[in-house]
Image: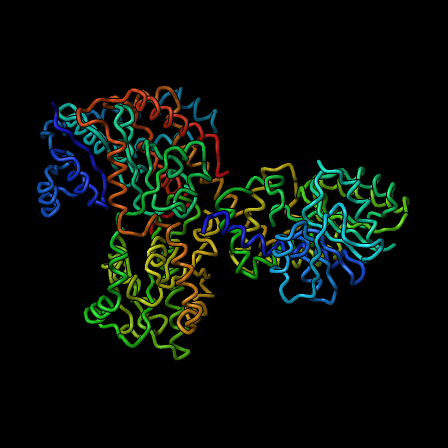
Amino acid sequence: MTHAAIESAGLTRLNDRVESDHLLAGVAGPKVIAVDYEAVRSSLSLARRGCSITAVGSSPSSLDALRELTEEAPVEPKLGDAHRLPAGDEAYDSLLSLDLVRPSLDWPGTLVEWARVVRPGGRLVFDVPVLACGDLVAEADRQGLVVVDVVPYGAFLAGGDVGHALPVAGKFWWGRLLSWLATDDRLFEFALFLEQELVARLVGAVTGRHLAVLERRRDPRQNEMWLRARDDVSDLTAREITLVSLGPHLRISTAEFTSRLNAHVRVSLRNFTFLHGLCQGLALSDIRVDLASFLETDVMARLEDWSQRLRLDRNVTSQARGWLTAPAAGKSMRLYGVSLGDALEYYLVEDLLTQGYGHFSGIRS
Amino acid sequence: MSRPAIVSLLWKDLGVLESFVRDNPRTRVFAAQGSEDPELVSAIAAAGGELLPLHGLLFAHDVTRAKAKAMARVARLETFFGGEEWARYSSDHGWPEERLGVLVTRRAQTDLPEIATALAALDRIDSLHALRLVIVNEDWTPRCRAVVLWANEHGVPSLHLGHSLDLCDPYTAHGRVMSTTMAVFGDRGTEPYLDADADMFAPRIRVTGNPAWDSYPQVVQERETIRAELAATHGCSLSLPWVMFATTWTTNQTAFTEENVYGSTLRQFLTACKALVDADRQICIVIKDRVPNQAFGRVRLAEIVSELGLDPDHVTYTLDDIEKWVVAVDVVVSVFSNVSVEALLASTPAINLVTTMDGALGPPFDADSGIVEAEGHELAAALEKILSDDDYRDRLREQMRQAAPRYNLGFDGSATARVVELMEELALPADGRRRPLQTLIARISAGWSAIVSLVGGRL
């Protein structure tokens, strides 16, 4: 199995759960039409809860794939096009799509077709990449739709535009860590908590991927209010995020948020490592977070201890290599035509850690 | 025409030297280790070459002169560190002027004489032979690094044949590899370097498999025989499950290691064993120690066994036969270790006992490796699950079989052949013609690496 596949198994588990939960929260009523493979896959959780699903495939082979995917589930495959749906007007309570709307496509035109098949008060739930909320609201107003929510998700956790937020994404070590999402329930629950209680409360700046929920109802005033609230969240992420500033946007109390966050971190070394990795990434990103306001004393102290060790490693390495860059030092170390300062580095690091900074006693036990 | 030669600072995988000579008769191998082994000397002679000590061409007065040169450099360093330039330079960089100067000088006093002798030997070898290649098992320790630097300076290709699969981020001194080419065991071995600097390392890394693991495909076929043999030698009961702990050690090369990791992890393992025994799970406990630990290893083990109230007769202490033990036991427990990788190759269920290292220096294993990970307090439960759940064990073994090629290319007993093929590809022509371009690339490589390491961190 390749590294990419290994990482992907963990992310897929988390992504499926996050999408399913958002879909469950987003749909209105039991009659659902899902218009692409990913949407059908995610809608299976709705089918298990009694919804009837119409699965639209654009070709006979895609219908076969949908049949294979849905097996015994109460899902009816239908041949059709996402832009010309095989459904009568107002035939469904909700429409789902997870892989179709792209800025380059005629998404306003697509929305017209989707809104056609949903009853008044029904909902369109679809994922979108980075999209100006103002544009979305303007189009919703034009088409008689209300923006219920645009939920950021995926982010650094679950296969979104991972390069968007954190520089750790794409590193092999981070991928190995994420692979454990597939089997380590404690890590999975921690990541899910961050997705649902933190990422989903923020704005697209942290993810590059969103799930939009639109309702077939005309209410420009509500859209305007939604847009204003969204601007408040944008302001939040433009400054340093603190527990106080985040509080009004959370769906749980700040006390519960910190309590659950710290409990997740403490439960295993791997979870702490996950937090540490996120913090390393945040430190290198544009997102500023006042960690001390979120983390309890013991967790913060441990995080600081790791940071201090990392700084010490960098410091001693810099010294073990750097002294040689002094011009006369380089000349002093030339022997048999070779500059040998670099040959002293290995044990000099240990000397610095032990005798220089007293980090080690020199006695192993 | 000068006789062709290669220089080896290998301390394992010495079999590649014999294979190389078989393909390249008349080669003289100047080796830091191996020339004291009559068997290897004979084997290389039979292959048509000659195995000589690295310093074999030096006279006593050459060594004396080399060491004197080294000490003269140390004296220069002392003068430099006592001068104004260093005071200014160290202050500009925020370094502790006096302390750093003292430590560098002391380190030079310790290491430079040996380094100078090695370089004198290289100069002599080079003057009398067509030197084709330098090969090392690692290029971080002083003499190996110096030999690689010498090779780079002289346009001789250098090959770093890792002595282990690098499971963690290349921390501190490990962040730079000066050899022109690196041979790693599997794709997994490339990851720490690609994470550190893909542009720098990708063109220099080759995946070969580990010559030291070439015997595994054969050894795993002989599991029952080996188990019976070890049972007879060490008195382990064949009717009980064998649970092995491979001890660990700290190099004190990163602030993330703990000096007490030997004792603390041994205690965690034995505590878990005690919990199993107290729950009526009879086991044979095997402690596979490392030779550098033996001076206090037995004593430390006896102390902990006594403190925990374990029966010492049920505990076997050994320093030898790691391959056989890995194949024969029922579970292997180790700490951020290649022993887990060996278990993976042998499809022996394995537990990585996690410590701070695992988090801070990059997780060593992924979820699909088949290697179980447990913290100390979870170890007893993890062992019990492996020992009691046949389906679980089978699933782990299947995962290990699937993962094996990622950790060690091929697992076909042919790593030695691949390394030799790489050596031949890299080696200069037997007439010793140097490649100016290669020299230039090596120097640029080393220079770039130095710059990157000075300005960059982990990310």
Q: What is the count of numbered marks?
A: 0
Horizontal side of residue A24 vs B216, given as left or right: right
Looking at the picture, tell me which residue is in the foreground, B423 or A201: B423
- Quadrant in which the C terminus of chain A is drawn: bottom left
Horizontal side of residue B269 vs B40, given as left or right: right
Residue extending furthest bottom? B280
Horizontal side of residue B220 vs A112, given as left or right: left
Q: Is residue A192 above or below residue A164?
A: below
**Image x and y of residue B8, in percent:** 21, 37
Seen at 83% across and 55% down, the residue is A122
Any part of residue B75 in sight = no
**Image x and y of residue B89, in percent:** 43, 23
Any part of residue B13 in sight = yes
Looking at the picture, tell me which residue is in the foreground, A254 or A31: A31
Seen at 72% across and 48% down, the residue is A81
Looking at the picture, tell me which residue is in the foreground, A354 or B434: B434
Q: How is the image coloured?
A: rainbow
**Image x and y of residue A109, in percent:** 79, 41
Q: Is residue B252 above or below residue B63?
A: below
Looking at the picture, tell me which residue is in the foreground, A198 or B44: B44
Residue A129 position by quadrant: top right
Residue B78 position by quadrant: top left
**Image x and y of residue A348, in percent:** 35, 36
